Image (spheres, rainbow, N blue to C red):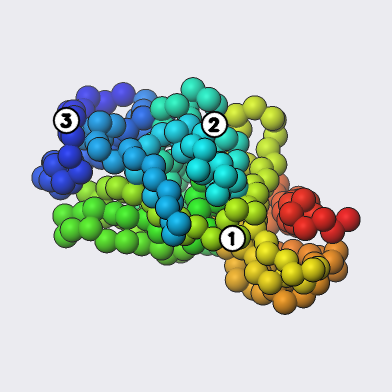
Amino acid sequence: MRAFGYTAVTDPAQAVRVAASTPHSTYIAGGTDLLNLMRDGAEAHGHLVDVSRLNTRRISLDSRRLRVGGAATMSEVAEDPGVRRAFPGLSEALLASASPQVRNMASIGGNLLQRTRCGYFRDEASPCNKRTAGSGCPAIEGHSRGHAILGGSDHCIATHPSDLAVALLSMDAQVHVLGSRGPRVVPIADFYLLPGTTPDRETVMDSEDLITRVDVPRTPLATRSRYLKLRDRATFEFAVVSVAASIQLRGRVVQDVRLAFGGVGTRPWRDQRVEGALRGRPLTAAAIREAGQALVREAAPREDNRFKVELVQRALASILDDLGGVR
């Protein structure tokens, strides 16, 4: 690991000032992903701004929304009684993430900004357009079992690993960001970028931007939310395929539905056409099948990950069955 400077801050505005005025700096909170990347040579930073002591750790819930501070840990949010009651899918997504030890350390802001698990990205000896722009993407013709079937480009097919982001996407969350130009609010649907020709740019965040809070609307749909994660082993492992879902039925007819997917897209994936295939129709096996087909209609799998096309449709059918009792 290369040498770096370090500053601990206690105020968000101070954090942004230090980051904006210090070249090659980045934020660190739990450090559960960042330190591994630096140790492996996948990332190099000249200065770390420690935001673990910021006063942005509060979790609050009222009749309109959940507010989660960016410095709150994954465990604190997952185990909060209000979150478990009003946003069960969010709690499930967090509890399905990582190990208890990591959840106790990792922050909400850090989780949303964690980097891909693509082995080529994390191997300093491999070229990677996400790590070094223009260097190439070995995954395109290489080992791609864990890679995306949706949203890829000729420059990158890496997936985003956050379970939390998938759950938040299905709940129309908003990300509060503080930067050198002041605060702003970004819908999470607009937060992550497709790789296109610039896979090194993954979000709309500028280098000194800090996630201060995430707001989640409190809705009847959110209280019926679930998160299903399929992975290679039952312990801490990243999703091969995941689905965040919530549904509101009148009788057997779908009044409203929210669906988001992980492990299949280059960013947390949501497609309004999938929800549209269900909305206003009886929740039947045929309707679910059509929704799944809409999801993968534009999929571009490789030989190693072709199985995801069917697996994600099965995952969708399974979680909707749990929520709506189809079978």
Which mark, by number, is residue 220?
A: 1
Residue 196 lies left or right of residue 13; in this view the side is: right
Say which quarter of the image contains residue 96. Answer: top right
Residue 164, above or below 206: above
- Residue 228 horizontal/vertical position (percent): 68, 45
Observer able to see residue 170: no
Which mark, by number, is residue 108?
A: none
- Residue 207 horizontal/vertical position (percent): 25, 50
> What is the CA distance from the residue labelled 2 to the residue labelled 3?
27 Å
- Residue 270 horizontal/vertical position (percent): 58, 63
> What is the CA distance from the residue labelled 2 to the residue labelled 1?
28 Å
**Which tag is nearer the camera, tag 2 or tag 1?**
1
**Which tag is nearer the camera, tag 3 or tag 1?**
1
Which mark, by number, is residue 7?
A: 3
> What is the CA distance from the residue labelled 3 to the residue labelled 1?
43 Å
Secondary element type, mark 3: strand
Amino acid type of disc 2?
A: Ala
Amino acid type of disc 1?
A: Pro
Residue at 33% across / 38% down in the picture? 57
- Residue 13 horizontal/vertical position (percent): 16, 46
State which tag comes first along the sequence, 3 or 1: 3
Q: Which residue is mark 2?
A: 98
